[in-house]
Image (cartoon, helix red, strand yellow):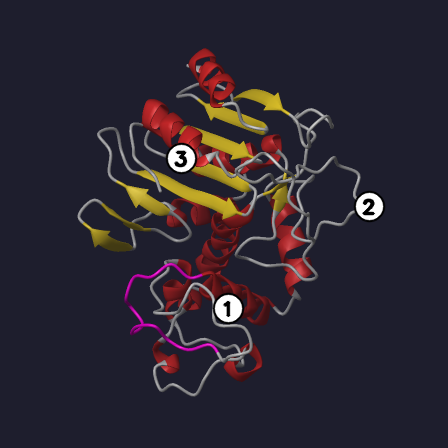
Amino acid sequence: MLDEMVAAVENANLVGCAVGLLPEGQDAEFSYRGECTPGGAAISEHVLWEAASLSKPVVALLAAELAGKDPEILQGPLTTDLSSFGADQDGRWPSVRLHHLLTHSAGLPNWRVSGEPLGFESDPGTPGYSGEGFELALRELSSLSGLNATLLLERHLEALAMRSSTFLPTESGSHTLAIGHDDDAKPRTKTFPTSPRASGSLHTTVPDFMRFLRAVARPAEVGRPSLREGVHRTAQRETEVIPGFGRTLGWAFAHGQHGDVLSQHGDNPGFKHIAAVRPATGEALLVLTNDDRGQGLYRALCKDFLDVDVW
């Protein structure tokens, strides 16, 4: 199967691409093709990628683990000072739960208009993809844990053995950075976050993120009981949008012949990624591309390997 994927990557003619494949009952295999920048460093296991929305299921696992100690974390009222988050005075806020935020069902927009307060697009409990929801979720997790977001996420990455990953990358970091490219294969300007963002500031290497995916795919291998329970929790169906498709904590799910496939796309300017897991068989797929043309490749690989159609 890896040989087929390598051929697909080569035929895609992208600036750069990395594929991680976890077949049933086997260890992960990797393929790297292309460059970080035209004429620059080659894509390799050491390259640090802008993960975009692949950040979301990593943060959701943090919430799921904390919920093992206190189930009310997911279903109880938010403890965050909503005015400090720029929320409006809508009377629906008291009904929002962390569960809503992590399953994209809080009724919030993906992003508010710059300079305006955060308000609702629909009632809480209504499906609707929201990056704002994950930022509020991180604020809530920080409030509940008593730790600032940076320290909270650093400890989480350490627990996942993602030691080369960070939610606060810098230009002076030790890793080579993958640079995004537009539809004409021209490099895009690299920007760096000034604060950690649950919705998309994770920067990671392929081996690091595959360790996370392996934990989701094969929770029996996870040593820490609370983390193992959290992994199980993130794989459970929470909301169904249409029959056979919906949300878990941090993932989209699609019903398949061999079990649900959990997936999350990453879509930042210059980067098009997919992460997909089938816990029933212990399989996982990671496709990272630093090219705005990468979506076609990752959709084809998901169809070939896991037999599902993804966004």
Question: Where residue 303 sits in the image (x, y, percent)?
Answer: 32, 28
Depicted 207 relative to depicted 63: above or below: above
Q: Does residue 112 appear in this view?
A: yes
Mark 3 crowdedness (10 Å alpha carbons): few <14, some 14-19, many ≥20: many
Mark 2–mark 1 distance (CA, rounded to whole Å):
29 Å
Q: What span is colored magenta in the figure?
A: 118-130
Q: Which residue is mark 1?
A: 136
Look at label 3 and name its amino acid: Val
Magenta stretch contains residue 120: yes
Labelled disc at residue 172: 2
Look at label 1 and name its amino acid: Leu
Query: Is 47 placed left or right of 308 in the picture?
Result: right
The residue nearer to you, when weighing 157 against 67, is 157
Query: Is 127 placed left or right of 196 in the picture?
Result: left
Task: Please tell me which of labels 1 and 3 falls first in the chain.
Answer: 1
Depicted 254 relative to depicted 88: above or below: above
Question: Where residue 110 sits in the image (x, y, percent)?
Answer: 43, 63
Q: Residue at x 43, y 36 (%)?
A: 295
